Image (cartoon, helix red, strand yellow):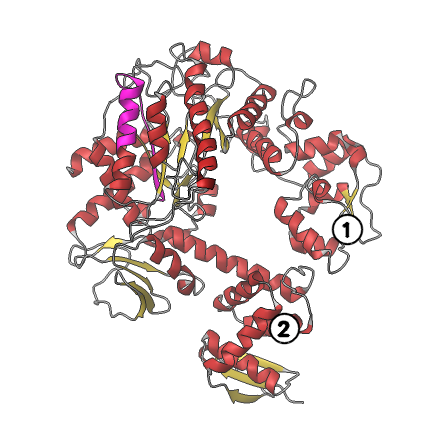
Amino acid sequence: MKNKNLIYDGTFDGFLSAIFYVFEHKLKSASIQNEFVVQQGLFSEVERIITDEGKANRVWKGIKSKLSSRGSYQLYYAFLSEQSGVEALLLDYIRYALSKVTPVDKDYAHPSVLKIAQIAKSVGREKHRMEAFVRFRLTKDDIYFANIEPDFNVLPLIEKHFKRRYADQKWVIYDIRRGYGLYYDLETVEIVNMDFPANFDFTKTDDEFFSTQEFEFQKLWQDYFKATNIASRKNMKLHVRHVPKRYWKYLSEKQPN
Amino acid sequence: MSFQRTQEKLKILADAAKYDVSCSSSGSKRSNTNKGLGDASGMGICHSYTEDGRCVSLLKILLTNHCIFDCAYCVTRKSNDIKRAAFKVQEVVDLTINFYRRNYIEGLFLSSGIFKSADFTMERLVAVAKKLRLEENFNGYIHLKSIPGASDELMREAGLYADRLSVNIEIPTEAGLKKLAPDKKREDFIKPMVKVKNEIIQYKAEKKILKSTPKFAPAGQSTQMIIGASGENDFQIMQTSNFFYKTYNLKRVYYSGYVPISYDNRLPQIGSAVPMLRENRLYQTDWLMRFYGFDVSEILNEQHQHLDLEVDPKLGWALRNLHEFPVDVNTADKRMLARIPGLGMKSVYKILNARRFRKLNWEHLKKIGVALNRAQYFMVCDSHQFEKRDLTSEKIKGLILQNSTSKYQKSLSNQLNLFG
């Protein structure tokens, strides 16, 4: 039988719709690909999957009934990693999970279970880091604005954290790599797309856009960061392991004076 | 708030507070209510790390570095010729709120030098916390340092607004304290600790009957000891810790390798190394006591008063108790798995789960993340390759050290580092 190449729209529902297709047509050999990163297989038939929320929900319900809650969140986390080839791994994992009566998410000696757990762990780490490293800056419109550039698509995972924590201030967290953000208007969180002015520098604060006291608090934070260091215990290797350099450009304490 | 004035104070009062190690911002159950600001119900978050590698999760400052005491190990001591400053209550509130809104911090850690008297100082610390909670509707984390000698009434009030309270016992032994801090008495540290402990017990009892009982120090209390300033050994230090954990239900004891800050000849001189490796070994021992089911006497006792700097305390224990090994990872109970060198609690749980599906072999264990370099000599698994060939402790230790490079190699080696 020929390999089927299923192309979906990149969303989680789209992916689950593709899984639905695999099981509906009892495909033994299928690859699932995000339409933004399609690589044509020479001998595969291509099938475009139409995202169907109903089908997606049925699949998700089925998976959840077979896995522990941890297993299903690991699966979702791994999906958000956007790593190349993760769909094949997920398909393998889902097939294995559905073939067993008891949850398999702790069968760490099974290759795809272990791999999914590891990917989910990296995504979880990135989520946690974004909760730590988001730096809000107060704009002239009284909105706290932060831009991020995470390796994985973690915005959906951090929404709840920030909504609960910053209930009394308006805020935006914008993923500039993926071109979308979250906006909290004191009531609900919405997904937003923004156009930034040509002269907007994501690493700097500019008095054209940001409030005057914003600079003062950034300065105070930088001073605090410096004062709290104990020079005789300096350990840059440890420092960089905790705060990897790729995050530095948007950390206010790491900006040159 | 005058920016320049605050800026100067912040530099002075953050610098003076940096020797306090505690940075925990977890363990509380204070969630955001009434659409306020902040939430301290989850796990703690380190928002940044200093260049020395310590976590920055709280705005850690002194209210003032004026002090009527003259403790030899303290930068803030009366006789030290340094710039002095004091924050106003409102300044600390503004800094906390504005740092929190920008997601710089999880909350406030407020300590203080002692101006005038213990109560006079404690009152101001409490005033900051009270203002944050009642006027700013702030639900972030607040850690207040109890001032030794503060009255019970003030300690009670502090516990109503703070998530955690702590009082540093500073020096592990009473004799050492007498030598280095002649103005301080151990009873003055103990009294607020007892008060807080009793209030927590009472709160928990009342909470069972009346759900609306106001929270009291939900993240408990902690303390800190300075290591390597007064000549005590590891056995004495861990005995003190054990006593404090057991007697006052402390959540954490912190160990702080002494950073030389004075020319006082009762203390290690300026320029001598901070005992970082020793500090690390003490934390490892502390962990073994709290999470791995070890009794402190198994690791340190009259015969073994010093922790081995070359190997971690769990490996040290295993080498002294080879008769307990090898452990079969496919059948051993949790307690024994946790005693295998190289196995952390996370690996222990993974093994317990994974072995329900199949027998585990070396390959599985490696993939799960077990540090086989150490573990292989102490376990058997589903494999004929049996690594423990009746080796002696010395031989095993040699083999392990040969195949590992300690991150503290530099501090272990006696060789001069010419090009470092």
Where B356 sits versus B208, above or below? below
**Dot 1 corresponds to which residue?**
B330
Residue B370, percent across and down?
67, 48
Q: Nearer the viewer, residue B226 or B270?
A: B226
Q: Which residues are magenta?
A: B106-127
Give the image quarter of residue B20. Answer: top left
Label 1 residue SS: loop
> For residue A21: magenta?
no
Residue B277, percent across and down?
55, 30
> For residue B126: magenta?
yes
Q: Nearer the viewer, mark 1 or mark 2?
A: 1
Asked if residue B205 can be seen in this view, the reply is: yes
Q: Which mark is residue A39?
A: none
Residue located 27% across and 34% down the image: B128
Where A217 sits versus B305, above or below? below
Label 2 residue SS: helix
